[in-house]
């Protein structure tokens, strides 16, 4: 026996409440709760009803299938982030700020893939003429991409299940799509969840590789229910500052490749251009002796990247000193300043501290602590750091410097770009690298000694 019960759900976060309210208690959004009908199976006195099932047949972990062939876009930075190319039936979700270049990137990718595989681009936000205008600006109007403008998800699913479906399909964007069976507006939690679920189901059944474009919230997260990111195979974020020409494509989830992999692009008048050597664009004036500048040897995914960390320390005019960061966690900065003052003997009170990651890159790696501390110490004392030197290492609350992963990879990248010194944590094992002088330190108190001896 089936019972129908009225429930209320929030369009913003998906929370379910037994009664209507003007404000959602979970996400504090106003006027976001809507009525819906919940159909459940009635329970008997002994518990939940259970239908008949079949015994599961288990298989061994080692299979006989061959390594899946990947569809390459021949855009190396894009293929790197995807794990080497697209896998058959792969569903990828890409998000980014409005106007950052998501549609531009995917149109260039579609144009490149269409040369060897049938590719379709379905837009719910633009007309076909608007897409053609963008293609002319990018110089890809001759590419055999199949265009369509539609917001009906049933039509897209029917095309994927047809006799001659495309190998790759791009849906731009999921917030504009709707299913007739869902009685809510496009972009709501129920519509986004249902449309994405149907796309994943059909993609796995037909083997069509799907790209889904998703809007983001003001906090930078992909809009809609969090389950959306769990349903897809790959989640990509297209990052960048409007004032910088460079864009970062970052993989935060990938079932067929490494996570935290990045691809770097340069936004030009004719579209996005690949940046094969990102370390070169994130470094500037590294040979010039300037206080407050340190070079961090970081790892993004499997790629070593050298980034310039800039710091400025000035006397404050406010009752409470200002701490400001661009490209790094502000809470992490507060912790480093406290350690430098308590364990390193530096007087940070009464000074405003500004920290910037050059090039618009956002760093989350704890190994950047030592480079940031070196830049701040150099700016405070107005003494330059050792020339052509790199830094990496995590700082603990006790002031100790902890080891980071992939030390050899970081040092090889530094040597390739001509750096002569590396200030790193004390190593558990001895390593020898020709062409670079390795200086190890145990705690932050030794950092100022290195700067003072250099000057």
Image: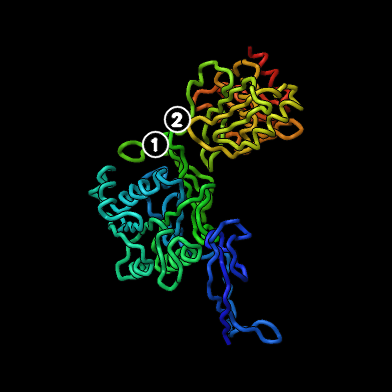
Q: Name the residue located 60 percent from the left edge and 56 percent from the top edge.
A: 28
Residue 298 position within the rendered picture, expressed as x and y whole percent measured from the top left: 56, 35
Q: Is residue 26 above or below residue 343?
A: below
Residue 218 position within the rendered picture, expressed as x and y whole percent measured from the top left: 51, 47
Q: Is residue 444 above or below residue 190?
A: above
Q: Circle 1 sits in a helix, a strand or a loop, which is it? A: strand
Give the crowd class for mark 1: few <14, some 14-19, many >=20 residues within 10 Å. some
On the question of residue 204 being in view, the answer is no
Q: Which mark is residue 353?
A: none
Looking at the rendered image, the quarter that the N terminus falls into is bottom right
Q: Name the residue located 31 percent from the left edge and 36 percent from the top edge.
A: 269
* Residue that badge 1 annotates: 266
Q: Is residue 177 above or below residue 107?
A: below
Question: Are the residues tagged 2 and 1 within 8 Å (C-beta)?
Answer: yes
Q: Circle 2 sits in a helix, a strand or a loop, which is it? A: helix
Q: Nearer the viewer, residue 43 or 438?
A: 43
Q: Nearer the viewer, residue 30 or 88?
A: 30
Looking at the rendered image, the quarter that the C terminus falls into is top right
The CA span between labels 2 and 1 is: 10 Å
On the question of residue 139 being in view, the answer is yes
* Residue that badge 2 annotates: 281
Report the number of numbered marks. 2
Residue 59 position within the rendered picture, expressed as x and y whole percent measured from the top left: 57, 71
Q: Give the mark nearest the N terminus, 2 or 1.
A: 1
Q: Name the residue located 56 percent from the left edge and 26 percent from the top edge.
A: 310
Q: Nearer the viewer, residue 358 or 453?
A: 358
Give the crowd class for mark 2: few <14, some 14-19, many >=20 residues within 10 Å. some
Q: Name the residue located 25 percent from the left edge and 45 percent from the top edge.
A: 136
Q: Quadrant of residue 424?
A: top right
């Amino acid at each position: 026996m089936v019972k129908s019960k009225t429930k209320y759900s929030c369009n913003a976060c998906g929370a379910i409440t037994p009664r209507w309210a003007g404000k959602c208690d979970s996400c504090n959004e106003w006027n976001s709760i809507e009525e819906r009908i919940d159909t459940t199976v009635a329970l008997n006195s002994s518990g939940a009803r259970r239908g008949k099932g079949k015994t599961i047949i288990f298989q061994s972990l080692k299979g006989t299938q061959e390594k899946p062939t990947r569809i390459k876009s021949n855009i190396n930075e894009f293929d790197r982030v995807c794990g080497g190319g697209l896998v058959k039936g792969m569903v990828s979700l890409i998000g980014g700020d409005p106007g950052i270049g998501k549609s531009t990137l995917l149109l260039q990718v579609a144009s490149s893939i269409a040369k060897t595989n049938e590719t379709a681009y379905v837009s719910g936000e633009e007309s076909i003429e608007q897409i053609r205008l963008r293609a002319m600006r990018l110089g890809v109007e001759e590419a055999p991409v199949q265009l369509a403008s539609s917001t009906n998800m049933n039509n897209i699913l029917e095309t994927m299940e047809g006799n001659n479906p495309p190998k790759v399909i791009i849906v731009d964007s999921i917030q504009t799509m709707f299913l007739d069976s869902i009685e809510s507006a496009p972009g709501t939690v129920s519509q986004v969840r249902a449309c994405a679920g149907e796309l994943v189901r059909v993609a796995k059944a037909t083997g069509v590789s799907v790209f889904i474009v998703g809007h983001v919230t003001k906090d930078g997260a992909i809009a809609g229910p969090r389950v959306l990111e769990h349903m897809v195979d790959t989640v990509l974020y297209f990052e960048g500052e409007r004032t910088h020409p460079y864009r970062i494509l970052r993989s935060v989830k990938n079932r067929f490749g490494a996570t935290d992999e990045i691809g770097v692009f340069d936004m030009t008048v004719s579209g996005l251009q690949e940046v094969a050597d990102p370390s070169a664009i994130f470094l500037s004036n590294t040979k010039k002796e300037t206080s407050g500048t340190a070079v961090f040897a970081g790892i993004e995914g499997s790629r070593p990247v050298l980034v310039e960390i800039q710091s400025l320390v000035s006397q404050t005019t406010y009752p409470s000193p200002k701490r400001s960061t661009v490209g790094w966690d502000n809470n992490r900065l507060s912790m480093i300043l406290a350690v430098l003052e308590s364990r390193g003997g530096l007087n940070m009170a009464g000074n405003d501290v500004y920290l910037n990651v050059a090039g618009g890159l956002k760093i989350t790696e704890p190994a950047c602590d030592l480079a940031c501390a070196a830049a701040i110490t150099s700016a405070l004392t107005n003494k330059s750091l050792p020339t052509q030197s790199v830094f990496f290492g995590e700082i603990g609350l006790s002031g100790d410097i902890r080891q980071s992963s992939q030390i050899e990879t970081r040092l090889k990248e530094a040597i390739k770009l001509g750096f002569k010194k590396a200030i790193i944590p004390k190593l558990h094992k001895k390593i020898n690298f020709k062409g670079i002088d390795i200086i190890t330190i145990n705690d932050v108190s030794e950092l100022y000694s290195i700067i003072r001896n250099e000057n």
